[in-house]
């Protein structure tokens, strides 16, 4: 196996003695490199936010809608610039996460405890040398694991343990162990477990058609319990001309699905068990003008869904997915500042289910990307094209779908702290296994959804260490997206069965503003501020005869904003976070009965860090707001969490 051979070669290279030379100090003067803009939260900023998962932290990114069904263990997905969750690619340490069944990644399963950085890019690529798969995503979420680094005079291991408890009978904890195995090899092992009943009070209020109060009551959310554990192991090594890494990950959960509060039904019997595991390896090397990047991965997803409600037909089904992935990409510097790249990815997905009449699909995907980047003193231009060939086999039936998607971007640095950028991109997403082959609902003739993106932006970034205003970043983006052949579920037939059809077309226009600053008024003081605002119009333009023609699509607010502020003094800090989501509609028609009110939440946290140990107290939904992100899925009111951390 390629990954095993790579590991053996790298291990053998460790036996060679290192030759060290003393280098004289050289001062390099010039313009900073022009990089495509990305929204990034990293380092201690992740700790200051009142967030417990990747999905929670992404609420502070512009243009992002987090679909949250409530509770500690509720499924959380993200929708970027109204293109749909399936158009958002998620990579973990440079290798994409996949879900061929429904095309969505539950970001609630990834903890912030072991993450160093979360980054979001829209369309443009931050680097040319990358897998072909990443050229195809309309938006990309990149998760970067904290990598252990040891100095020469430091002991060769570290241990960080965490214990947390709070509302909803929540108790959880985790530990991360980091070790230096040799001069070139470091390792880390991280484990986390959480348990919660998920019970919380919520308010239900309904009005009659005349506007009178039909009922107004307080109830308790049930069947929102969860028990979950995550274990992750990483191995990192440096080579004379590159590096390699190996990651093993598993996430197991047993959770209740609270369900919607409708028709006076307050309790549900739905449950879901997940066992998601993968092993991946990454190798990167450089020889003169050549760079090589190789990735390999195997993933297994096991999901069991059961519904034991006595009012409905009992359901107990199991879904298993296998994914194999190989990728190789190479870049060559033709001339100083001019680089060409080519990448090839091979992806194999297979799914089984114990549903009656389920046809087990097998999907083979070939992706070939070619691109070039010209980097001048103040200007960077990047162009690429991705060819995707998808072959599905279900029994004796064989279907092929092909697509070619180009993209181009440019950045210009007119002055030291300023950057102007532009991007145009075409992308698509294949129908998922559920869309195509789900019993009584799938449609094997579906066409892929296609997206066209255009973005214009400007960024001002100032970094002056040692000054009062240490960091200041301002950004603004105007964008236009067009989604064609949007896949929707449509009822048809006398039995009111649902089928999947290519009916939708969506026109999306928006403006995003973002700001971040760090102020150091005195030696022991530090003030951090960040905020973002999004104005977005996303309308359905499928059919002029529809009553909802040119109406805002469901669950997309016109206005949304977030802000975070932190004040630190020596080992103490206080942080405040605010999120605002404007009114939106829960159905296609923008009429009064489908209108959902705006909502806003405030979170407050107090922290003390004394080196070896630290403590953090959080008060979330400080003002005890009653709100719902999704209709009939009430969110928790005021809740608390206390976290103690020990560093050895």
Image: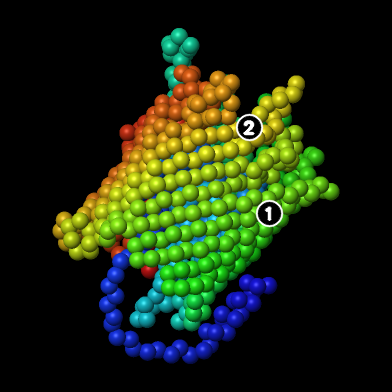
Along the polypeptide, which appears first: circle 2 or circle 1? 1
Seen from the viewer's position, the closer of residues 58 and 89 is: 89
Q: Nearer the viewer, residue 616 or 330?
A: 330
Q: Say if 167 sits above or below 608 in the image.
A: above
- In the image, taking residue 563 as reference, residue 312 lies left or right, namely right
Q: Quadrant of residue 468?
A: bottom left
Residue 203 visible from this viewpoint: yes
Q: Is residue 642 visible?
A: no
- Looking at the image, the residue that sits furthest to the right is 396
- Image quadrant in which the N terminus is located: bottom right
Q: For residue 503, which numbered disc appears in the image?
A: 2
Which of the colour schemes (rainbow, by chain, secondary structure, one colour) is used?
A: rainbow
Quadrant holding the C terminus: bottom left
User: Where in the figure is residue 55, as x and y percent of width and height?
Assistant: 47, 46
Q: In the depicted view, which residue is nearer to us: 158 or 625? A: 625
Residue 257 location, quadrant: top right
* Disc 1, SS: strand
Residue 265 location in percent, x, y?
A: 57, 24
Q: Residue at x 79, y 49 (%)?
A: 398
Extreme residue toward the top, this view? 210
Q: Which residue is mark 1?
A: 389
Name the residue located 64 percent from the left edge and 50 percent from the top edge. 403
Q: Residue furthest left?
A: 522
- From the viewer's side, name the closer residue of 576 and 446: 446
Mark 1: give few (<14), some (14-19) or many (20+) Cα within 10 Å: some
């Amino acid at each position: 196996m390629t990954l095993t051979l790579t590991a053996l070669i790298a291990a053998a290279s460790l036996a060679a003695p290192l030759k060290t030379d003393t280098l004289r100090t050289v001062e390099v003067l010039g313009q900073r490199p022009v990089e495509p803009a990305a929204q990034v939260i990293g380092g201690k900023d992740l700790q200051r936010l009142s967030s417990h998962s990747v999905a929670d932290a992404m609420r502070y990114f512009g243009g992002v809608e987090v679909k949250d069904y409530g509770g500690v263990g509720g499924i959380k997905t993200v929708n970027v610039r109204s293109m749909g969750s399936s158009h958002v690619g998620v990579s973990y340490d440079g290798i994409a996460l996949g879900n061929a069944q429904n095309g969505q990644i539950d970001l609630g399963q990834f903890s912030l405890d072991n993450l160093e950085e979360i980054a979001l890019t829209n369309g443009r690529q931050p680097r040319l040398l990358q897998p072909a798969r990443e050229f195809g995503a309309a938006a990309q979420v990149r998760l970067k694991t904290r990598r252990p680094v040891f100095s020469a005079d430091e002991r060769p291991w570290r241990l960080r343990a965490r214990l947390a408890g709070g509302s909803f009978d929540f108790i959880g904890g985790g530990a991360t162990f980091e070790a230096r195995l040799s001069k070139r090899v470091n390792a880390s092992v991280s484990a986390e477990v959480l348990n919660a009943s998920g019970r919380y009070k919520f308010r239900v209020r309904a009005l009659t058609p005349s506007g009178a109060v039909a009922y107004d009551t307080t109830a308790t959310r049930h069947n929102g319990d969860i028990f979950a554990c995550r274990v992750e192991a990483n191995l990192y090594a440096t080579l004379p001309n590159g590096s390699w890494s190996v990651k093993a990950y598993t996430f197991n959960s047993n959770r209740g699905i609270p369900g919607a509060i409708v028709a006076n039904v307050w309790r549900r019997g739905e449950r879901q068990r997940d066992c998601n595991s993968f092993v991946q390896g990454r190798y990167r090397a450089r020889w003169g003008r050549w760079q090589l990047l190789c990735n390999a991965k195997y993933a297994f997803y096991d999901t069991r869904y059961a519904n034991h409600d006595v009012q409905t037909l009992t359901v107990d089904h199991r879904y298993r997915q296998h994914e194999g992935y190989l990728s190789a990409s190479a870049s060559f510097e033709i001339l100083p500042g001019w680089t060409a790249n080519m990448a090839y990815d091979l992806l194999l997905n297979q799914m089984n289910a114990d549903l009656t009449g389920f046809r087990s699909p097998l999907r083979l995907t070939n992706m070939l990307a070619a691109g070039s980047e010209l980097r001048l003193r103040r200007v960077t231009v990047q162009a690429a094209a991705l060819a995707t060939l998808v072959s599905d086999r279900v029994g004796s039936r064989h279907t092929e779908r092909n697509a070619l998607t180009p993209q181009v971007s440019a950045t210009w640095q007119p002055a030291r702290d300023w950057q102007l950028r532009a991007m145009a991109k075409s992308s698509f997403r294949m129908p998922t296994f559920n869309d195509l082959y789900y019993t009584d609902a799938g449609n094997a003739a579906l066409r892929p959804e296609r997206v066209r993106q255009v973005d214009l932006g400007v960024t001002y970034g100032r970094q002056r260490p040692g000054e009062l205003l240490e960091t200041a970043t301002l950004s603004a983006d105007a964008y236009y997206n067009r989604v064609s052949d949007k896949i929707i579920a449509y009822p048809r037939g006398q039995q009111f069965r649902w089928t999947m059809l290519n009916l939708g077309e969506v026109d999306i226009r928006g403006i995003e503003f973002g700001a971040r600053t760090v102020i150091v008024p005195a030696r022991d003081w530090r003030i951090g501020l960040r905020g973002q605002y999004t104005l977005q119009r996303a309308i359905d333009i499928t059919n002029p005869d529809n009553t909802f023609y040119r109406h805002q699509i469901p669950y997309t607010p016109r206005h949304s904003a977030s802000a975070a502020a932190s004040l630190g003094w020596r080992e103490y800090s206080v942080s405040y976070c605010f999120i605002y989501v404007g009114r939106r509609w829960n159905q296609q028609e923008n009429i009064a009965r489908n209108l959902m009110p705006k909502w806003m939440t405030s979170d407050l946290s107090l922290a003390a860090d004394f080196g070896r140990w630290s403590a953090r107290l959080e008060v979330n939904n400080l003002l005890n707001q009653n709100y719902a992100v999704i209709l009939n899925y009430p969110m928790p009111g005021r809740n608390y969490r206390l976290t103690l951390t020990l560093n050895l």
